[in-house]
Amino acid sequence: MLEPFKMTYTVLGGLGIFILGMKYLSDSLQMLSGGLIRKAISSLTSNRILAVIVGLSITAFVQSSSITTVMVVGLTNAGLMQLSQAIGVILGANIGTTITGWILAVKVGKYGLLLVALGIFPMLFSKNERISAIAKVFVALGLIFFGLEIMSDAFKPLRTHEGFMNLMLLLDAQSLLSLLGCVAIGCVMTMIVQSSSAMLGITIALASTGAIPIHTAIALVMGENIGTTITAQLAAIGSTVAARRAAMAHSTFNVLGVFIIITIFSPFVGLVEMLVPGSADFINAEGNHPYAAAHIALAHSMFNVTATLAMLPFLKQLERLVVRIIPETGGIEKGPFKYIGPPGSMPVAMGTSMVLQELIRMHTRVHKALRHVGSLLHRDLKGRDRFYQKVKEIEQQTDVMQHEITTFTVTLMQAGKASKEQSDMAYGYVRAADELESIADYTASICSYMKRLEKHELDFSDDAWKDLIRFHHEVLVFYNHVSDSFKEEKPTDAASIRQEASRLNDLADEIRNAHLARTKAGACGALPGLTFSDMAVALRRIKNHTVNLHEALCFETTPEA
């Protein structure tokens, strides 16, 4: 009983070191990627090729297709990504995740501890974030290779274990039933472990020691491709129809791809054998199979690249199939943004990117509220109550969005290790959400002032209305100018913002003086005069919060206006 127990805890220990290395690698590559992930997400268009490239790039940097697909489900759930875009990113993620296999195929397992030794001290003690992140890559690779080496050594006794070898005779993937059994085992084990990279590491370790033949290893990898889709399916539980469709597209694509490979499995394995130098069955002096890992890595890459290229022309058909599998449940789903998955499991770079997208969405709603206020300033507007209601709804929505953004971002920063740049950006986003919510509050305040006039059957002079309409127009243009700069990620010059804010201050003073002159001349009563002043002050506050919005998003210090 001692040997099986020792093998079990050795394998689990090696797997733990391996998974820790994968996590370190993901964290450090994200930090080194800078704004690449954020820019990749913001570059998404309906172009299917670009969507695939984005999915591939992000997955290559975070070393986890599960993280990428969960992010895609989240963005689709928020209405920030179309299903066709989501499918393209998912296809790219499937290709990006194959890089892990090639990392594992590198034969430096014995030097894992050397890599840890080279990186551990700079990672722990360097004050330079970039040097620390690079050192963390060395430590991560060292842990990955060392964990793989431990698992390989632990699996070696299986080569001569009679019971295990008899099982492998049944699961040699040479017959259809045996092949399906291997695929099922790979699928179920990946669902349990919740990491296709971890299962890939186990598969390579088993194949490299000769415990399982190459046919079995490749069949297991096919099953792992299906099993990894469970993460997105779990993330989509309770989400919108669009989010569930994105998760289903991931599963459908992988299942279809695997069954296509099953129909040509023997020629497929033969092609892999032909392309990789050295036979997978070659045994070196130590009794290992040194070329098995490269065979598995190539099979993994060929499967995903071929399936993606084959599926690209049929994305519309795949989209229609997914829509038929998950039909509309009735009614239009409404509500504020819903983040998918706990922030603690989300990479900081992706989390902040999603917050930026939500801020842009929040900005759009506030912009609508400002335009509705502009419409209300025209006395001949019909259906005023409808506009009042729209502004009130937007004000309530922004309250919820501001709370969600703040809660999510704070949790994200506490759970993940963020660089100083990411921390500054996250703080800026929290502050920006607060500024946008304040602007929405003032639009609702202006509506209440308008209702005050209607309740008491009061009115302003034509000049007063013209001044308010003019000031509102100038403030709206200023708001759009600041907001467009962060939507397009082109920071506006702080000096020009200060100059424009100063000009609006002068305009506000001009309007106030004109109002005082009308009041002295008796052209405006007490209550209308107070209401005009309240509305003018609200517009000025909107201008001030817009200046603060620029400061928050551009991470520059702009004096209070």
Image (cartoon, rainbow, N blue to C red):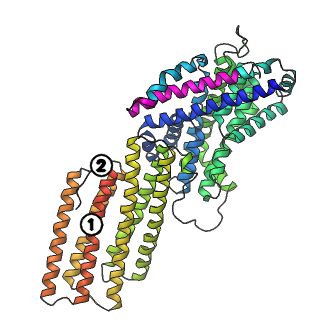
User: Image quarter for residue 526?
Assistant: bottom left
Q: Which residues are magenta?
A: 124-152
| Residue type of the residue flagged with mark 2 | Pro
Around disc 1, counting alpha carbons within 10 Å, would you say few (fewer than 14), some (14 to 19), or many (20 or more)? many
Mark 2 and mark 1: Cα distance apart in space: 19 Å
User: Image quarter for residue 244?
Assistant: bottom right
Q: Nearer the viewer, residue 64 or 271?
A: 64
| Residue type of the residue flagged with mark 1 | Val
Q: Is residue 491 left or right of residue 325?
A: left
- Magenta: main secondary structure equals helix
Check disc 2 and report its element: helix, strand or loop. loop
Q: Looking at the image, is 281 positioned above or below residue 122?
A: above
Q: Is residue 143 magenta?
A: yes
- The quarter of the picture where the N terminus appears is top right
Q: Which residue matches tag 1?
A: 475
Residue at x-position 30% and y-position 55%: 550
Q: Position of residue 86 (x, y in %)?
A: 56, 48
Q: Which residue matches tag 2?
A: 491
Q: Position of residue 5 (x, y in %)?
A: 79, 28
Q: Nearer the viewer, residue 468 or 201?
A: 201
Q: Earlier in the sequence, mark 2 or mark 1?
A: 1
Q: Is residue 137 magenta?
A: yes
Residue at x-position 52% and y-position 37%: 62
